[in-house]
Image (cartoon, helix red, strand yellow):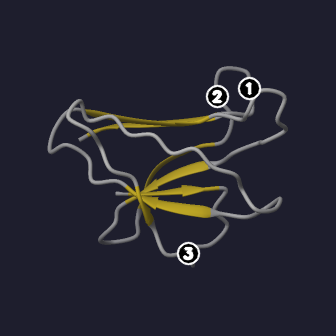
Amino acid sequence: MLLRADAPSFADVPIPIALDGTDSGRMTGTLSAPGSQDVYRIIPPADGPLQVRMVAAPGGALDSLLELVDGVTGGLLTSNDDTRGSTDSLVGRRM
């Protein structure tokens, strides 16, 4: 699975996010400029739920967009711009 954050195009090389023994992973970072995109690669469990959140730092002005993309076909599986009354993003899918 590929996860695109603030992704107007699909040009970046995916950054891997490793999952631990509880199928959890975490990435902390900084977007380089407004409108920039980061692409991450996640290998999810064979079955069960997958949930990814992007949350702005406290006091931050990030308005994120997440897209979950099939890593083989490049097809969009799901996306989210704003969730729960905030500018944070949340995507989920049952594998």
Q: Which residue: 81% across, 62% down?
A: 33
Alpha-carbon span between mark 2 and mark 1:
6 Å
Q: Name the mark on residue 62.
A: none
**Left or right relative to 21: residue 85:** right
Tag 2: amino acid: Thr
Residue 70: give x, y in percent of width and height. Answer: 35, 61
| Residue assigned mark 3 | 12
Frontmost of labels 3 and 2 is: 3
Tell me the crowding category of disc 2: few under 14, some 14 to 19, or many 20 or more residues within 10 angstroms, Cα based: few
Q: Which residue: 47% across, 59% down?
A: 40
- For the C terminus, the quadrant is top left
Tell me the crowding category of disc 3: few under 14, some 14 to 19, or many 20 or more residues within 10 angstroms, Cα based: few
The total of numbered circles placed on residues is 3
Tag 1: amino acid: Ser
Tag 3: amino acid: Asp
The answer to whether 19 is drawn above or below residue 43 in the figure is: above
Tell me which corner region of the image, top left, top right, bottom left or bottom right, holds residue 50.
top left
Q: Name the mark on residue 86.
A: 1
Alpha-carbon span between mark 3 and mark 1:
27 Å
Residue 49: give x, y in percent of width and height. Answer: 28, 32
Q: Name the mark on residue 83.
A: 2
Residue 77: give x, y in percent of width and height. Answer: 41, 52
Precedes in sequence: disc 3 or disc 1: 3
Q: Are marks 2 and 1 in contact (CB under 8 Å)?
A: yes
Precedes in sequence: disc 3 or disc 2: 3
From the viewer's side, name the closer residue of 28 and 3.
28
Q: Which residue: 26% across, 35% down?
A: 23
